[in-house]
Amino acid sequence: MDTSRVRLPAGVGASYEVYVNGIRQQPGRDFDRLGDELLFRRALAQEGRLGPIRWLSMLLGVAGTYRKHETVDVIYEVEGRRTVATLTPNSGV
């Protein structure tokens, strides 16, 4: 089973919301919290590095980059203020 992990920022308590590409994720169904990490029950796609041919084609306006890239947003409160952290998943755990 492919999974992804995301390390939570310091200060995230028991009350928080998690979104992947703007879609709310449900604890116990989409992910589990293990200490200061979230373990997603599927692999989250990351675009990765672009090679020299891809950079050249983008520079010349021949092609763009259309690879799948998923973002994880965690909304939580710090000192009574709503805070949003955009996190980078680590796949293949």
Image (spheres, rainbow, N blue to C red):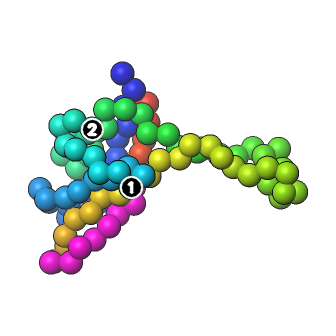
**Residue drawn 44% across the image and 39% down it:** 44
Which residues, given as a range, are shown in magenta? 80-87
The tag on residue 63 is none
- Quarter of the rendering occupied by the N terminus: top left
Please tell me whether mark 1 sits on a helix, a strand or a loop: loop
Amino acid residing under circle 2 = Asp
What secondary structure is the magenta-colored segment mainly?
Answer: strand
The tag on residue 30 is 2
Q: Position of residue 17 (x, y in %)?
A: 23, 56
Residue 13 inside the magenta-drawn segment = no
* Quarter-of-image position of residue 87: bottom left
Residue that label 1 marks: 22
Amino acid residing under circle 1 = Gly
Extreme residue toward the front, this view: 23
**Residue drawn 32% across the image and 67% down it:** 84
* Label 2 CA crowd tier, 10 Å (few <14, some 14–19, many 20+): some
Above or below: residue 84 compared with residue 70: below
Q: Position of residue 8 (x, y in %)?
A: 28, 54
Residue nearer the viewer, 62 or 11 = 62
